[in-house]
Image (tube, helix red, strand yellow):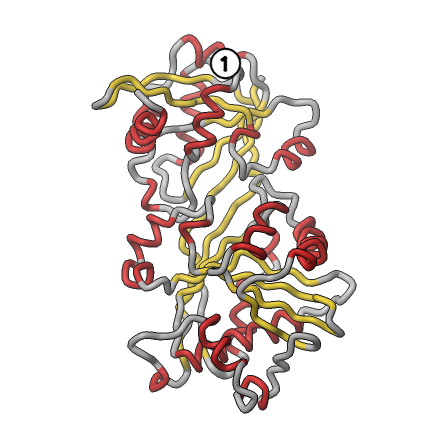
């Protein structure tokens, strides 16, 4: 059996209900291949219609690209933290000598539980105890929360049968000197103000990423990696023509960058099948808009830039008759400061559109310390 076939069977057998959650469950095909090749991985086998497939049960924490290994190193120093997988088809019968021996060698296991999972972390605890594990502590390490909200035009007569995306409207309006983008108080300007870019030049990537990375360091106390890594950021900034890059500059120097994309299939931690199933018409029309990130240069110290950028986006929405459904996910810190409410306030204060963000799901991360 080739790897692609085995992986497809692995997904179908172990995550039959993955469509019910907005975060991708389990391993990507590259992670699956690398995990099977890793010497520390503990697997079991399941029979499928095409033969036996290998299913990881215990794997090194770094095998999943979105696990924040720095967080685990700080939380559990000098400890080999392993991830415990609870695939649906085998979780009730997990066991076997290899699994039991694997548990004897571990001190800390990480288990992630999506909000739609039946049994929650208690199911993992029951499985571990049935396989001889003695549990000392169970700690909730963090939660990733998913939100959605439908942007609605305040003037419904502006709706179009075929709305124009932000970049389309901006290109048309920015070519017209008499456009209200320039005659209003939006401060739309590539040198001193906000400008929307299809792509940005390489020489601005490092400047933008430096303060993007700095802004996201405050989020590092989370079990799930937050923000894009340098290569992902560069790719979205320089190569991705679908993602909108809104940059606020002062005297030509970038102060704030905001990223938004309709290409949710290109976000590898996102389960686009969930959104396709939940919002089929908007998915088909590419009217699901994901916010992968916003960051302000710490030296600028201005959240007002974010509001100015939001006002440009909502104005473009009105001019293009565009009412996307906005999607994003937050770690505990962003939820605790009410950043989703800040987004609401920015969008609603522009006068063109209204939105209310709702929590749709979460993914909890537990640390289980064994004796």
Q: Is residue 15 above or below residue 182?
A: above
Name which quarter of the figure residue 287 lies in: bottom left
Q: Residue at x 58, y 24 (%)?
A: 108
Name which quarter of the figure residue 87 lies in: top left
Count numbered badges in the picture: 1
Q: Nearer the viewer, residue 260 or 201?
A: 201
Q: Residue at x 55, y 77 (%)?
A: 311
116 displayed left or right of 331 = left
59 displayed left or right of 47 = right
Q: Is residue 199 above or below residue 27?
A: below
Label 1, on which residue?
A: 102
Q: Nearer the viewer, residue 202 or 160?
A: 202
Q: Nearer the viewer, residue 217 or 7?
A: 7
Q: Residue at x 53, y 82 (%)?
A: 175
Residue 226 pos. (x, y %): 59, 47
Q: Is residue 169 above or below residue 231?
A: below
Instruction: Determine whether the residue tagged by mark 1 lies in a helix, strand or loop.
Output: helix
Q: Residue at x 29, y 77 (%)?
A: 161
Q: Quadrant location of the N terminus? A: top left
Residue 5 pos. (x, y %): 30, 27
181 displayed left or right of 216 = left
Mark 1 crowd level (few <14, some 14–19, many ≥20, 10 Å Cα): some
Residue 284 pos. (x, y %): 30, 60
Q: Residue furthest left?
A: 49
Residue 304 pos. (x, y %): 66, 73
Q: Quadrant location of the C terminus? A: top right
Q: Is residue 84 above or below residue 271?
A: above
Q: Residue furthest right?
A: 299
């Amino acid at each position: 059996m080739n790897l692609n076939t085995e992986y497809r069977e692995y997904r179908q057998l172990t995550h039959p209900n993955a469509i019910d959650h907005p975060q991708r469950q389990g391993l990507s095909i590259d992670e699956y291949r690398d995990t099977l090749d890793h010497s520390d991985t503990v697997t079991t086998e399941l029979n499928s219609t095409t033969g036996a497939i290998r299913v990881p049960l215990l794997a090194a924490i770094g095998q999943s690209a979105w696990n924040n290994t720095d967080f685990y190193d700080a939380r559990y120093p000098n400890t080999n933290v392993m991830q415990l997988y609870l695939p649906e088809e085998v979780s009730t019968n997990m066991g076997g000598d290899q699994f039991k021996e694997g548990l004897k060698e571990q001190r800390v296991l990480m288990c992630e539980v999506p909000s739609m999972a039946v049994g929650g972390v208690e199911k993992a605890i029951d499985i571990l105890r049935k396989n001889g594990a003695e549990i000392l502590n169970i700690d909730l390490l963090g939660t990733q929360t998913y939100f959605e909200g439908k942007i609605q035009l305040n003037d419904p007569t502006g709706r179009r049968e075929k709305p124009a995306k932000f970049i389309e409207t901006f290109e048309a309006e920015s070519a017209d000197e008499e456009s209200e983008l320039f005659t209003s108080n939006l401060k739309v300007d590539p040198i001193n103000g906000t400008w929307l870019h299809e792509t940005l030049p390489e020489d601005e990537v490092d400047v933008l990423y430096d303060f993007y990375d700095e802004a996201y360091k405050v989020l590092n106390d989370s079990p799930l990696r937050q923000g894009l890594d340098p290569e992902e950021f560069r790719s979205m900034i320089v190569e991705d023509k679908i993602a909108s890059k809104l940059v606020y500059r002062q005297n030509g120097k970038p102060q704030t960058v905001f990223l938004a994309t309709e290409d949710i299939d290109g976000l590898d931690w996102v389960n686009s099948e969930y959104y396709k199933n939940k919002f089929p018409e908007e998915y088909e029309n590419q009217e699901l808009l994901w916010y992968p990130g916003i960051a302000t240069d710490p030296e600028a110290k201005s959240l007002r830039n974010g509001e100015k950028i939001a006002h440009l986006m909502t104005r473009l929405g009105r001019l293009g008759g565009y009412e996307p459904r906005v999607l994003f996910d937050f770690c505990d810190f962003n939820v605790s400061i009410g950043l989703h409410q800040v987004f609401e306030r920015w969008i609603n204060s522009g006068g063109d559109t209204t939105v209310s963000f709702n929590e749709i799901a979460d993914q909890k991360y537990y640390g289980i310390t064994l004796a």
